[in-house]
Amino acid sequence: MDLFRLAWKNLWRSRRRTLITLAAIGLSVMLVQAFHNLAFGTYARMIDSGVRAGSGHIAIYHEGYVESRDETLSFEPQGLVETVRDLPKVEEALPRLYLPGLAQSSRESRGIMLTGVHPEAERRVNPFIKDLPEDEMVRDLEGRDAVIGQRLLDELKIRQGGKFVITVQSRSGELVSELFRVRGVVETGIKDIDRSLVMVGLDRAAAMNGRPGEISELAVILDEPEADRSVHPLLEKLTADRPHLDVLSWEKAMPNLANAIKLDYASQKVIFAIIVLIVTIGVVNTLLMSVMERFHEFGVILALGASPGKLRRMVLAEALLLGLVAMVFGCVLGTLGTWYLAEVGIDLRTFISEDLEFGGVVFEPVLKAGWDVVWMVQIALYVVFLSVLASLYPAVKAGRIVPAEAMRHF
Amino acid sequence: MQLRSLSTIALGLILLSASSAFALDLRELIREIEDQHTGRSSRAVMNMQVETSHWERSLVMNAVSLGRDHFLIRIQEPPKEKGVATLKVEQEVWNYLPKVDRVIKVPPSMMGGSWMGSHITNNDLVKAAKIDQDYDFALLGETDTTWRINCTPKPEAAVVWGRIVYLVEKARRVPLTVDYFDEDGIKVRTITFDEVKEIDGRQVPMLMAVQPLEKPQESTVMHYRELEFGVPVEESFFSLRNLRQR
Amino acid sequence: MTMLTTLALRNLWRNHRRSLLTLTAMVVSSSLLILALGIFSGMLQDMLASATEQYHGHLVVSRDGYQDDRDLFSTLAPESELIDRLSEQEGVNGVSPRLRTFGLLSAGESSRPVELLGVQPAKEQQVTTLQNKLVAGRYLTEDSGNGALLGRGLAERLDAEIGEQLVFLTQAADGSIGNDLITVTGIFATGDTGHDNSLALVNLNWLQRLVILPGQAHEIALHLEDPLTAPQKAEALEKLLPPELEAIDWGRLMPEMNEVIATYDVSRMIIIVILYFATGLGILNTFFMSVMERTREFGILMAMGLRPWRIRILVLLEALLLGVLSLVIGVGLGALLTLYMREVGIDLSGYITPVTYAGGTILPRLTAVFEPANFWLPALLLLILCLLSAFFPANRAARLQPVEAIREE
């Protein structure tokens, strides 16, 4: 205990240096924590949107569907939809059927992707259509309502409420045509989707396919991403008797999104490693200097009978205290910074020219932080660890002091 | 561009059988006009002239058909495209290209595309016009010589038009013009018929012009130079091997 | 002056441990900072390159409205005069005229809709990088005749191999049925399913003849030295071009990719600020403290007659000498590290596959580039910071009465 009291006093003897070092470490900790949390929050939102519009946190497909997107690889859910919906931690189960087809109006024709959905469930969950007013969404499962992309509406030269005909090739090979009316229009900002999305009731699409009841994907939306651990095995069990069905997590079903995040994360790690190195060098430097300046003093202490070990431990204790205080200081700042970024965030529009329109769905213009507490605690521990590590060399040097020479130092 | 009924007129005219009914049953009348009788065969030589805003083209073609599910059309002129042929068997369409000596199957995604560059689409060739089933009919007006018939699509019918109006010559029960409207009442296309001849006991217009109204410089005109019905031909004739013959 | 300089040097040497410590800290910090900046620039360049250089190029010149409707008849004649004028523009280092048709590619029973892009191979390779994405066969040459480069997905769906002949069918510009055989000379894989499943590259001359558009092209794609200047270059070009032509930069051609890159750029700037902060704090700590601790020493010097202003200059000189030396080494080390990253880099393809989004592809690797600004700017800023952090405590000491200064611990 005395050791620490002594160490503490020593720290504050050179008040300015201690304060500046604390500031350096503390601010770096804050920046690293706050920025990581910003990235963390941004990734979480990207995943959330991607998951809700795409394959869900977990999805069930026919074997081989994800690689080939072959519309003939559809399957009969056989009650899976309701069973999965009732599982704990499952927010929603979205059955969908995707059929490539041709849309024709009185003036133009375009290739499209016919998407059969459960309208109510989809509207609750899917970010592409969540802004659609309720009376503009598809009303039922077998009707002729369609929600289409803005670009498609323009290219077909029709209006809201206008009619168009969709032709698909049914499983038996014949061409099936059905009438639809534009009930609602969406603009996702993603060109490909706005040009080819035609969302209709699932039963109508399945009937056109010639296989009523069959779907291409069952997207499962969870209450929280971590629930994947408990729900995934449940889904595997439910489909165990049907080996041609795959249960895929979103990372496998949407590898693009997963990889984009991994790549960003990788470059972030490299940069943070560099920041940590820079700060560590500074700390080593500071500690060494503080030891060097006290050579004379240490020489006296040693001459008076203190053991080199005690001296080393004192240096270590100083570094430890410094690290602890810096950690607390840094974490407090980091928490404040994260709180600010979580509430207010960074609005990218202030940095980028206004000409740039944001998709608004996958890319929100305001970046907000999340709370990756585990990571924050890790950084805190690293700081303390590094401080102690940084003190090893100075401590060794202090222990090697020969009193007679040291006292000659000034 | 939608031209379902044009093809059926084109092909249906080849297939018309002798009509017997005299009373004005609109549905029956339209059915006659668009009639798709199975089991009827025909042979024809036609000249198709297409004008677009960028080019003009004139083709001479031979056609053989059996019912509405089988036909084989081969280009005779111009020399550059001589031998190019189209085969339809039920819902499938193939093209033969003599220059490279290959047969190509037309995939569903290309069904909206134009056939031989005209204002007729592959889709039109494939789909049987069910105008008499997809529409309800009403007599709009009548003069001494003509009937004007309004066709409104049934609420569930898979047709892109808002309505279609037929102007029919009473005497010979042949169409004079057919107007296609979108749902806002704008006329999108008009087909005009002319040169009515009697073939096999039936009155058949030998000239047909398709006019897309929003592109007034464009048109497709089909002119039948020769036409005969009841030609002896079997289903086996409509094969890929025959498609390849030059 | 020389006396002060000598004194400065002696002081540095006298406290060689402290000087060495300070030097090391500066060298490590500055070199790492330079490396980080190089990595960021490298990432951005990589993203930009792979996003734009596989297909679009950095800038395209075409008829008004062509990029929206891709109308076959919206052509321009890429006469050598126009090409030369474009090539001569500042910052333009690649010019490639292209013709585009859509049609059907068929092999046996399979047919697929396809986009055929007619190019001049030598020129095209200066604008796009498909030649680096070949998984089989070879790129086109001027005498490839009817040779074609197919996307991998397209080749797979048609079951086509190198040397095989496929039929291409389209509508020619005179309305006739354009058709011919193509020979598969190469297969590419960009990772972008859109292009891999429906794009084929052919010779411009051959395509012009097939669709009967002799001497015509739909667009001229340009490659710039600095793709980030594309919007400004586009504006500048528009003024030079006849009114029926327009110049469009990649940001407008691929707005979704533009979002991604803009977001990345902003994050990059934020992190760079953080990096400068961290480095700056470290340097501040080092220099500031080392001077502060010599207050007593300065007091003695002043008591012995050294004028206060000389104290200031002395300290500045020390900081300057030490600063310049450490920055020279730091910049050198930073350059070496950057070189390593550029030549070797960190390859992540073991656990990340290329990321495709909205028409572009981002490769899974970390690399760096040499940009002069990444060297002289940090060096300059850090030097100024050294001088400032040394100056303030020196100034403070110089202002004190010698006796007070001596009394400081």
Image (cartoon, grey):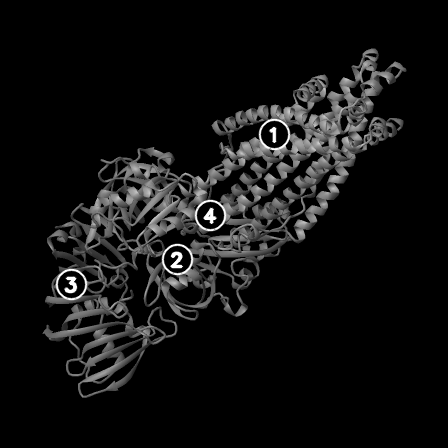
Q: Quadrant of the N terminus of chain C?
A: top right
Contact (CB < 8 A) between labels 2 and 1? no
Q: Chain of mark 2?
A: A
Q: Chain of mark 1?
A: C
Q: Quadrant of the C terminus of chain C?
A: top right
Query: How far is mark 3 from mark 4, CA to CA?
Result: 47 Å
Query: How far is mark 2 from mark 4, CA to CA?
Result: 23 Å
Query: How far is mark 3 from mark 2, CA to CA?
Result: 31 Å
Q: Which residue is mark 4?
A: C257
Percent position (x, y) of residue A198?
A: 43, 61
Mark seen at residue C30: 1
Q: Chain of mark 3?
A: B
Residue C158 visible here: no
Marks 1 and 4: same chain? yes
Q: Which residue is mark 2?
A: A112
Residue type, label 3: Met
Element on which disc 3 rests: strand
Q: Which residue is mark 3?
A: B48
